[in-house]
Each structure stands twice: as structure tokens, then as C-alpha cells.
Image (cartoon, rainbow, N blue to C red):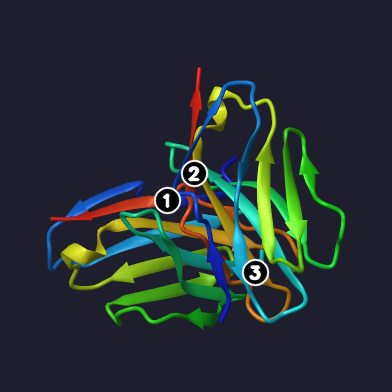
């Protein structure tokens, strides 16, 4: 069975600085998808970025980028130029490329942004 | 125009009651889900329907019963509510392919 681990329960970053959130996963599959979701205090789950395992190029969405290391089964999220609105819980999620589209979520990292 | 809407947003009820949460999506997605987020923020899948067919039925008490009258709607009915059912319940939908989910805004259920 697949597992997703987020080893940092909480992180802090100064406004305008860069922060990296860690995520590791375990799977025997070769094709899958990885996601980062943001959950602000409003409770809404917002898709931040996704990565297809067969693509070597790291995904980027504006200030958000990932460092995807397939061999190491690592999928970290880098947030550049942190803003107060980035404060939220961040969840890493794994999804198989076949079968059902069930997500396996990590336990989340709470990000605080300091003014 | 809300893509995935859940009602109600908040639900406070007494132990032993029966309650339902409704979910509707206007994205044309084929697959819908119910996830439970516990007090420690952990998210776990409960059920999934693809075109009205149940495709995921995780180990949850049989007091929880999903119903999908059509592919745009997925409801969750809970019988004989218990204190441990208190959580946030998220509905989500996804299209075929590698795209991520679109989540509803969640229903915070509090059983007293």
C-alpha cells in the first residue's frame, strides 16, 4: 500500500523569504501523480501544483515549484517570495495512474508567515 | 458559480440523530468522492462514485451510506450519529485523466 509522509508538522517563514515543505512517499508503482493542496483557515482545499511521475521536469506555478526526485521518492514544495496569504495547512497527496482516483494524503504541514 | 457545492456548511446535532449532507458539482466530472478530515486534520477517503457506480467503499461504519442519483450529485447519509463522527466532511469531484480534485468547501459536523 502507498504511504505519504510529511515530517514537518509546522514551519515558519519570514514574509518575502523562501520556504521548502518536505514530502516523501512509498509506492511500488512506476506511474502516478503527486499533488500539493493548500488549506487556509477558510477550510477550502485548493490545488497548488501537480506533478506527473513520468515527467522529469519539475512543475512550476508562479511562486510555487516542486523538487521531484523519483528515485528518492521525494516531492518537496518550494514557495518563493512568501506572502501573508500563503499561511495555511499544506497537504501532499499521491494518486495512482490506474484504477480508482483515490488520493493518499500526508498529515499536513502548517505554514506560518511572519510579517 | 460554485463548482462543487456542499450543504449545509455547518451541522450541529445530537447523538442518535440521522442527518444528510448534500453535494452537487457543475463541472461535468464523472467521479465524485467523500473524504473525512478528523480533528488532527488528517484526510481519509470514505466513498467514491463514478457515473453513479460505487467504486470505492473504504472501511467505514455501515451507519454511513452514500447515494448518487446522477453523476452530478453525491449525498452522504449518516444514521445514529455518534460523538466520534464529529469531523469535517469534504465532497470532491474529478474528471478522467491526471487532473486533481475540485473540492467543496466542507461540512463541519458536530455531534453533541
Residue at the disc numbered 3: A95
Q: Residues within 10 Å of mark 1 (few under 14, many from 20)?
A: many
Q: Does dot 3 land on a helix, a strand or a loop?
A: strand
Classify A98 as above or below A113.
Answer: below
Snapshot quadrant of residue B97: bottom right
Snapshot quadrant of residue A13: top right
* Left or right of residue B31, residue A49 in this image: right
Residue at the disc numbered 1: B106
Tell me if residue B34 can be seen: yes
- Quadrant occupied by the C terminus of chain B: bottom left
Letter of the chain that mark 1 sits on in the rendering: B
Q: Tell me which residue sits at (57%, 67%) in the image.
A: A103
Q: Does dot 2 land on a helix, a strand or a loop?
A: loop
Q: Indicate which label's residue lies in the foreground, 1 or 3.
A: 3
Between residue A34 and residue B77, name the one nearer to us: A34
Q: Position of residue B77 (x, y in %)?
A: 33, 69
- Quadrant occupied by the N terminus of chain B: top right
Between residue B55 and residue A13, name the one nearer to us: A13
Q: Residues within 10 Å of mark 3 (few under 14, many from 20)?
A: many
Rounded to the nearest angstrom, the CA distance separating label 2 from label 1 is 7 Å
Q: Indicate which label's residue lies in the foreground, 3 or 2.
A: 3
Q: Tell me which residue sits at (50%, 51%) in the image.
A: B104
Residue at the disc numbered 2: A44
Rounded to the nearest angstrom, the CA distance separating label 1 from label 3 is 21 Å
Q: Do marks 3 and 2 both belong to one polypeptide chain? A: yes
Rounded to the nearest angstrom, the CA distance separating label 3 from label 2 is 20 Å
Q: Do marks 2 and 1 both belong to one polypeptide chain? A: no
Classify A65 as above or below A93.
Answer: above
Amino acid at each position: 500500500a502507498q504511504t505519504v509522509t510529511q515530517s514537518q508538522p509546522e514551519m515558519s517563514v519570514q514574509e518575502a523569504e523562501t520556504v521548502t515543505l518536505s514530502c516523501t512517499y512509498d509506492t511500488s508503482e512506476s506511474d502516478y501523480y503527486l499533488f500539493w493542496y493548500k488549506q487556509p483557515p477558510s477550510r477550502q482545499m485548493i490545488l497548488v501544483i501537480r506533478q506527473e511521475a513520468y515527467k522529469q521536469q519539475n512543475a512550476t506555478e508562479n511562486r510555487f515549484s516542486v523538487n521531484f526526485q523519483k528515485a528518492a521518492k521525494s516531492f518537496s514544495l518550494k514557495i518563493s517570495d512568501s506572502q501573508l496569504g500563503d499561511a495555511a495547512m499544506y497537504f501532499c497527496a499521491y494518486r495512482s495512474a490506474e484504477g480508482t482516483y483515490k488520493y493518499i494524503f500526508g498529515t499536513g504541514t502548517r505554514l506560518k508567515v511572519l510579517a | 458559480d460554485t463548482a462543487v457545492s456542499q450543504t449545509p456548511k455547518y451541522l450541529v446535532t445530537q447523538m442518535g440523530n440521522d442527518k444528510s449532507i448534500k453535494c452537487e458539482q457543475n463541472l461535468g466530472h464523472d467521479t465524485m468522492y467523500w473524504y473525512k478530515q478528523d480533528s488532527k486534520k488528517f484526510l481519509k477517503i470514505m466513498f467514491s462514485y463514478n457515473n453513479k457506480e460505487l467504486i470505492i467503499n473504504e472501511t467505514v461504519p455501515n451507519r454511513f451510506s452514500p447515494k448518487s442519483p446522477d453523476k452530478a450529485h453525491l449525498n452522504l447519509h449518516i444514521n445514529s450519529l455518534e460523538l466520534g463522527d464529529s469531523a469535517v466532511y469534504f465532497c470532491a469531484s474529478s474528471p478522467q485523466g491526471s487532473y486533481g480534485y475540485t473540492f467543496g468547501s466542507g461540512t463541519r459536523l458536530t455531534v453533541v
